Image (cartoon, rainbow, N blue to C red):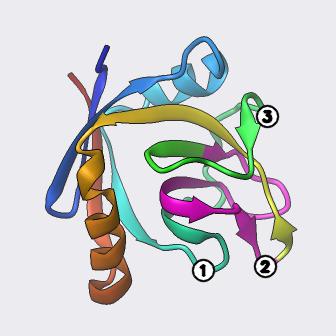
Amino acid sequence: MNELRVVAGDFTFEGRFEDALAPATCAAFRKRLPFESQVIHVRWSGEGVWIPLGDLEFGVGYENATSYPAPGEIILYPGGVSETEILLAYGGVQFASKAGQLAGNHFITLTTGLENLRALGKSTLWKGAQKIVFSAI
């Protein structure tokens, strides 16, 4: 079941919250919908785009954490060693920062528009920051 729409740059995706695996993260993020920001290309992690969130608190710990999100999986790093951030994988990713490997909570999986993930990543890499909006549907 598609529960949210993600518009990033020129592309629209739909996805689902991973409530069974990351209930606290999903609940905390739902409270912030619609969520608007910008994605930039990752620096250390591989093929992904991320939203740096500084010291923004979601009030969650680790759940369903991974360092290797698959294309279309969105993870939230709740902060600690590095700043709070959201990462969307469009290809091979080993989630990391200048401090080394990190793990983030896999809480959203995109289910439509996956054929456009690589184009979003390349557009972000070569053209710069892209607007992103998460909204309930």
Near-viewer residue (1 or 23): 1
Mark 2 in CB contact with mark 1 (< 8 angstroms): yes
- Name the residue at 53% across, 21% down: 18
Q: Secondary structure at mark 3?
A: loop
Of the residues under marks 2 and 1, which one precedes in the sequence?
1
**Amino acid on which the number 3 mark rests in the picture:** Tyr
Choose mark 3 or mark 1, whichever is in front. Answer: 1
Of the residues under marks 3 and 2, which one precedes in the sequence?
3
Is 93 inside the magenta-drawn segment?
yes
> Quick check: 94 left or right of 129?
right
Packing grade of label 2 (10 A; few <14, some 14-19, many >=20) is: few
**Magenta stretch, residue numbers:** 76-98
Q: CA distance from mark 3 to mark 2?
A: 20 Å
* Residue hosting label 2: 98
Give the vertical position of 93 relative to 57 (above or below). below
- Name the residue at 78% across, 33% down: 61
**Amino acid on which the number 1 mark rests in the picture:** Arg
Give the vertical position of 68 relative to 83 (above or below). above
Is 120 inside the magenta-drawn segment?
no
Q: Position of residue 137 (x, y in %)?
A: 20, 22
* Residue hosting label 3: 62
- Name the residue at 30% across, 46% down: 114
Q: Position of residue 83 (x, y in %)?
A: 70, 62
Packing grade of label 3 (10 A; few <14, some 14-19, many >=20) is: some
* Residue hosting label 1: 43
